[in-house]
Image (spheres, rainbow, N blue to C red):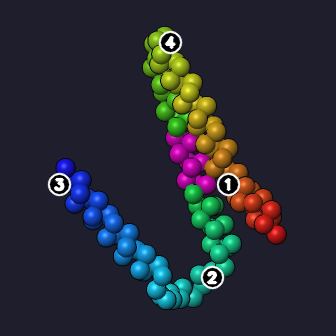
Amino acid sequence: MMNKKIISLVILAGLFFCAQAALGQVVITPPAGVPQDFSTILTNIVKTVGSVIASLGTIMIIIAGILYLTSAGSQERLTTAKKALIYAVVGIVIGLSATTIVDIVKGLGK
């Protein structure tokens, strides 16, 4: 019971200090060559995350193939392999279309 109170107090203090930092007038200037436009920064982040997701999806396809080959006729393992393959393909599609999705959302805001 005492540990929960201490943890809650630490979390509350941390949130308080984060709020103080967020409300302060701290100005951080980016180094030369770094885009200052939020839209450009968001697009760069989405491109990077999208490519990581697509790469992980490719690895998951390989893992799903290994699961399928080593299932030895077990229906449960076949189902797991098929689900992994479906999720991997969905992940690749989302990863590759992430930039397009952000562009569409940015276009709706104009």
Vertical comparison of 22 with 108: above or below: below
Sequence-wise, the earlier of marks 1 and 4 is: 4
Examine the residues drawn in magenta and state their main secondary structure: helix
- Residue 105 figure quarter: bottom right
SS category of the residue bearing label 1: helix
Q: Which residues are magenta?
A: 50-59
Query: Distance of mark 1 from mark 3, alpha carbons?
Result: 45 Å
Q: Is residue 47 above or below residue 19?
A: above
What residue does disc 4 label?
A: 75
Is 57 contained in the magenta span? yes
Rendered image: mark on residue 2: 3
- The answer to whether residue 75 is above or below residue 17 is above
Label annotation for residue 98: 1
**Amino acid tagged 1:** Ala
| Residue at (63% x, 37% y) in the render | 89
Residue 42: say if magenta.
no
Q: CA distance from mark 2 to mark 1?
A: 21 Å
Per the rendering, the mark at residue 36 is: 2
- Badge 2: residue crowd in 10 Å (few <14, some 14–19, many ≥20): few
Image marks 2 and 3: residues in contact by CB distance under 8 Å: no
